[in-house]
């Protein structure tokens, strides 16, 4: 399998989409990428598992990390890709076109072509982004090669509809529990019903008005949701336990401790256990290099709601944004498709900024 | 295995408790009962599966059905029986002592001894009372031998603490459903959360004040309880469905249709499906024969809350009461135990009424 990095971004997107690379099965694509980069003298290529890094070392004043994952969620009868037309607009349809091989293809093409960028670039293409964090190729690389994670700015090619989506919300999961006393339901008054006691939990969640928080010029919308509820022993037993699992998405200006304190105030009086959390990433758009980037690509900065790997860079103190073709609402969708014009626009935007600023 | 029906009620209770007869496994005990009754000339013995009927046919003006089930819930390290003392009171401890082999033992002893009762008696001992209604031995017998269910009054030996518990509440199960729209929980506002929408269901159940309903002189306490709740798709998905299973226990003056109408008014505005119901049994204590019975046994009439097989007799127009030794709250309990004095008192009560009134 040979990748032609001189092909158009669209053709290169098709080529790498048609090499299926569901999480855990990225080796063929990683091999093809490594092989295509190997002849390029301006890049130092480093491989770690199925993660490929390609660096320039031109002695520029600033270094930018530009990253994209090469895995996808499972294919669902939506490969090979097809060129389709929807309401007069051309799309590339198929698994991975949005999340995020179009973005990765643009990066591969520019990595090959930009032999003399105005900043040094650390290109990173990694595996296992769509599965548990412990397998994430970027995370595994950072653990063994922190030296590769030195940069002044980072761009992740996650789909952002061709705009710049800054940072990301944090996420926290918790379980809220009520307890009671079992009894036969024929004599309900002898027991205490734990499910009835969950009423105020659901009421508070239902009435909760999520905040919008301005962080470095971007308005992050938070949310607090029940994602699971369970309780009950048998059809004739007053239940003595009920559990509500909640998911809180919080602005990147809040720490996990801030988020937990807020959860505990909203659900004061209830037994609450935090089971999982990941802080968000500040958009970093107040950094001069980030402002130059936004101006150069001519995109509108927006907040990113979903958690992405920008948070890894943010945690290292590196301002990081998402910038890639494709509507994030179509990621993982069986009708996943990317507008051809957005692939070209993102290529133009990145090329312009990396060539002169 | 030979049963000695001339033994004391206590010894006979021990003997039939120590023959374990968990629902579905009653054959050994049914065989022993049939064999013990066979030599008695004053009784016609009829067997149907593991249900045994023994009838007098003395041409009395009135006939009374007296019934008890011979199965128990599973044994939980609480056999063989033991005689224990709690706060100076003697108890027989072990599975089945309360529910309801003490009551059944008293009936067996009186069936053997009362060769000349003042009423004709149809004694009935049946299997599979503790499991699904479709296996209930009394119900199966009624389906094939309705002629055996002709009586002026019926007494079920279910534990009633030695008092007379009249009739029983009805029971209805229903599922109340909410729906919503799935979305990624990072963009919760795009979805509609079905679990949050269940808040008013739980609130109405929690605020519900159950009625007390006077039926033929007995005050029945109703109840309305959530017995199960479930909802949720995944930890990062706004749930599009939630189900609350409820159990309504309603006074025997209400029909199932009345009960359903009430449920629908309490939960107006929600999708509600009735999945199961059984009407209660009126206590029938206004019948002269029932009043004579209560006076003769010297017991205090009370309402029965749990559904029992008295409802089968009630549905046939036969006034029916529960009268047996043992505290119903200890039925199915691992520390199930019956006061020895109550076994004797119930034997005296039944014997007195059946011998002269």
Image (tube, coloured by chain):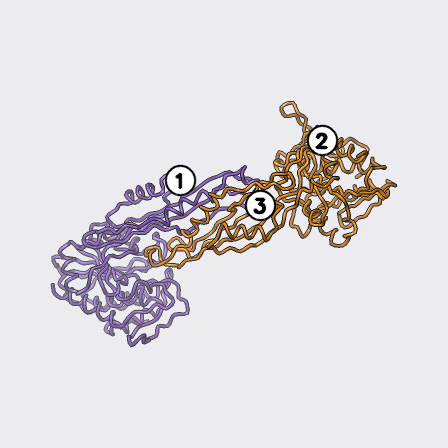
Chain colours: A orange, B purple
Indicate the chain on which mark 3 is placed.
A
Q: Which of marks 2 and 1 is in front?
A: 2
- Residue A105 percent location from the top left of the image: 75, 36
Residue receiving disc 3: A249
Q: Nearer the viewer, residue A302 or A192?
A: A302
Give SS at disc 1: strand
Task: Kindly indicate whether the residues beneath marks 2 and 1 are on one polypeptide chain.
Answer: no
In this rendering, does residue B26 appear at all? Answer: no
Which residue occupies 69% across, 31% down?
A92
In which quadrant of the rendered image does the N terminus of chain A lie? top right
Q: What separation in Å lies between label 1 and label 3 (alpha carbons)?
A: 31 Å
Residue receiving disc 2: A298
- Residue B81 percent location from the top left of the image: 35, 72
In which quadrant of the rendered image does the C terminus of chain A lie? top right
Which residue occupies 14% across, 57% down?
B289
Q: Answer few, some or many: residues within 10 Å of disc 1's Cα (few below 14, many 20 plus, some between 14 and 19).
A: few
Residue receiving disc 1: B271
Q: Answer few, some or many: residues within 10 Å of disc 3's Cα (few below 14, many 20 plus, some between 14 and 19).
A: many
């Amino acid at each position: 399998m040979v990748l032609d990095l001189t092909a158009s971004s669209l053709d290169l997107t098709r080529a790498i989409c048609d090499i299926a690379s569901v999480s855990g099965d990225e080796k063929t694509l990683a091999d093809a990428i490594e092989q295509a980069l190997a002849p390029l003298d301006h890049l130092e290529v480093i491989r770690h598992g199925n993660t490929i890094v390609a660096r320039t070392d031109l002695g520029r004043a600033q270094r930018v990390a530009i990253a994209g994952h090469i895995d996808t969620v499972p294919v669902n009868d939506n490969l090979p890709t097809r060129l389709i037309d929807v309401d007069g607009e051309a799309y590339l349809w198929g698994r991975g076109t949005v999340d995020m091989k179009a973005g990765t293809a643009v990066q591969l093409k520019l990595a090959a072509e930009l032999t003399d960028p105005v900043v040094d670039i650390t290109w990173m293409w990694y595996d296992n982004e769509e599965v548990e964090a412990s397998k994430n190729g970027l995370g595994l690389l950072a653990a063994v090669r922190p030296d590769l994670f030195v940069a002044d700015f980072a761009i992740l090619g996650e789909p952002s509809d061709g705009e710049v989506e800054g940072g990301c919300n944090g996420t926290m999961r918790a379980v809220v529990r009520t307890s009671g006393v079992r009894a036969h339901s024929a004599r309900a008054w002898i027991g205490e019903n734990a499910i009835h006691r969950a009423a105020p939990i659901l009421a508070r969640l239902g009435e909760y008005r999520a905040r919008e928080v301005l962080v470095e010029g971007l308005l992050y919308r938070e949310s607090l949701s029940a994602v699971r509820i369970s309780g009950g022993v048998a059809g004739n037993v007053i239940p003595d336990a009920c559990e509500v699992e909640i998911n809180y998405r919080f602005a990147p200006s809040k720490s996990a401790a801030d988020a937990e304190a807020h959860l505990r105030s909203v659900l004061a009086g209830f037994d609450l256990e935090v089971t999982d959390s990941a802080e968000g990433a500040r958009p970093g758009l107040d950094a001069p290099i980030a402002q130059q980037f936004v101006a150069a690509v001519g995109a509108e900065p927006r907040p990113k709601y979903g958690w992405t790997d920008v948070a890894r860079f943010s945690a290292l103190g590196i301002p990081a944004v998402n910038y890639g073709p494709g509507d994030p609402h179509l990621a993982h969708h069986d009708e996943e498709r990317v507008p051809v014009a957005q692939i070209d626009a993102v290529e133009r935007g990145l090329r312009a900024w990396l060539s002169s600023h």
